[in-house]
Image (spheres, rainbow, N blue to C red):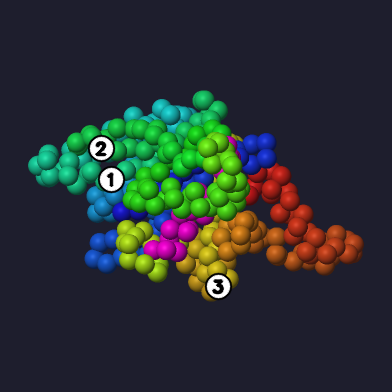
């Protein structure tokens, strides 16, 4: 099982889609560095899943292979809102090939969800939804998660699939209270918010609890994160959980391993993006002998990325 979430982050005058998941697969024991989010060659969308990995994973992988194989779905000629039918046919075709009685298949598919989200060039908006089975037939849903009172997302976007929904809602409420605060006299008043990184912070809070307690056995590892922009490109985001632990798609990076992807630092009170490329010193003669402080260049590079929606 798992927790997978997707939401729209408001960033200055634009917005961006974020998709996150935990990193645990359970079968014979728990594997805590498993990739659960997958990029597609078209770059403007991604896949996630939850459920029994022995069932969900083959479905999930074949959907990605199908979309990458067909030229219209691979090159964005077909909008993401138009390829949900294709995904549904792939899922249902695979289930049809499963050599089990219908009732047994339906039981096995009860917890399986395939998340599909990205940027729609046709409608000029982010589209977030998931496939779930009704019996042995998968259908697409755009069901948003309600967050706890008094919080209200200005434009509802948060989608949740997987286990521990009530626990996740409580963790998100704790993060929002910590970040924005609620005065006792405002308890009955709705408080509107735009999400920043609070949804992945709530996921990390649950994962920290799961590492020290036995009441959340279906989730584990570190968060994994993908960002998708309105210009139709995706960007994997590394995760920093402490000074020595950095993860990419759930896998802990080796001590010697470097990444050029931005890293979301979850150690600080307010998460911040680190830009590894900003730390690379410039050659001394790059500016024809003009002295330039490397830390200033690093800060400038980060500012350029921030202003250009590169974070």
Q: What label does residue 133 carry, if any?
A: 2
> Which quadrant of the structure image shows residue 308?
top right
Q: What is the magenta range?
A: 192-210
What residue occupies the far front of the structure in this picture? 185
For label 1, the residue is 112
Q: Quadrant of residue 229?
A: top right
Q: Is residue 197 visible?
A: no
Q: Is residue 266 left or right of residue 70?
A: right
Question: Dot 3: within a 10 Å radius of its alpha carbon, few (fewer than 14), some, or many (20 or more) residues?
Answer: few
- Check if mark 1's residue and mark 2's residue have beta carbons within 8 Å: yes
Magenta-drawn stretch, dominant element (helix, strand or loop): helix
Work out how far the residue at label 2 is from the one at label 3, CA to CA, in angstroms.
41 Å
- Counting residues from the start of the chain, the first of labels 3 and 1 encountered is 1
Mark 1 → mark 2, Cα distance in angstroms: 7 Å
- Tag 2–tag 3 contact (CB < 8 Å): no
The picture places residue 178, in percent across and down from the top left corner, at 57, 53
The residue located at (88%, 64%) in the rendering is 291
Which disc number belongs to residue 260?
none
Asked if residue 186 can be seen in this view, the reply is yes
First in sequence, mark 2 or 3: give its number.
Answer: 2
Query: How packed is label 2: few (under 14 Cα within 10 Å), some, or many (20 or more)?
Result: many
Q: Is residue 193 magenta?
A: yes
Q: Residue at x 36, y 33 (%)?
A: 141
Given residues 73 and 169, the one toward you in this image is 169
Residue furthest to the top: 123
SS for tag 3?
loop
Residue 244's disc is: 3
Left or right of 189 in this view: 218: left
Q: Secondary structure at mark 1?
A: loop
Which x, y percent locates residue 188?
53, 37
């Amino acid at each position: 099982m798992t927790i997978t979430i997707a939401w729209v982050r408001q960033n200055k005058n634009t917005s961006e889609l974020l998709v996150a998941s935990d990193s645990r697969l359970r079968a014979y024991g728990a594997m805590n560095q498993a990739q659960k989010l997958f990029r597609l060659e078209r770059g403007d969308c991604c896949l996630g899943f939850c459920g029994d990995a022995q069932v969900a994973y083959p479905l999930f992988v074949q959907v990605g292979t199908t979309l990458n194989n067909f030229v219209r779905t691979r090159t964005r000629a077909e909008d993401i809102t138009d390829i949900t039918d294709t995904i549904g046919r792939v899922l249902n075709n695979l289930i049809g090939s499963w050599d089990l009685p219908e009732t047994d298949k339906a039981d096995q598919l009860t917890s399986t969800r395939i998340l599909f989200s990205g940027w729609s060039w046709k409608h000029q908006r982010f589209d977030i939804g998931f496939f779930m089975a009704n019996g042995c037939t998968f259908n697409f849903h755009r069901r948003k998660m309600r967050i706890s009172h008094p919080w209200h997302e200005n434009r509802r976007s948060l989608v949740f699939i997987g286990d521990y929904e009530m626990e996740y809602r409580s963790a998100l409420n704790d993060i929002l209270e910590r970040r924005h605060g609620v005065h006792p006299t405002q308890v009955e008043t709705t408080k509107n918010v735009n999400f920043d990184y609070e949804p992945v912070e709530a996921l990390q809070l649950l994962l920290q609890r799961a590492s020290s307690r036995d009441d959340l056995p279906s989730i584990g590892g570190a968060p994994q994160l993908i960002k998708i922009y309105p210009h139709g490109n995706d960007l994997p985001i590394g995760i920093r959980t402490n000074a020595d632990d950095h993860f990419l798609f759930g896998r802990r990076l080796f001590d010697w391993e470097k990444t050029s992807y931005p890293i979301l630092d979850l150690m600080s009170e307010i998460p911040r993006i680190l830009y590894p490329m900003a730390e690379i010193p410039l050659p001394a003669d790059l500016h024809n002998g003009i002295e330039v402080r490397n830390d200033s260049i690093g800060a400038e590079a980060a500012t350029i990325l921030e202003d250009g929606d590169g974070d």
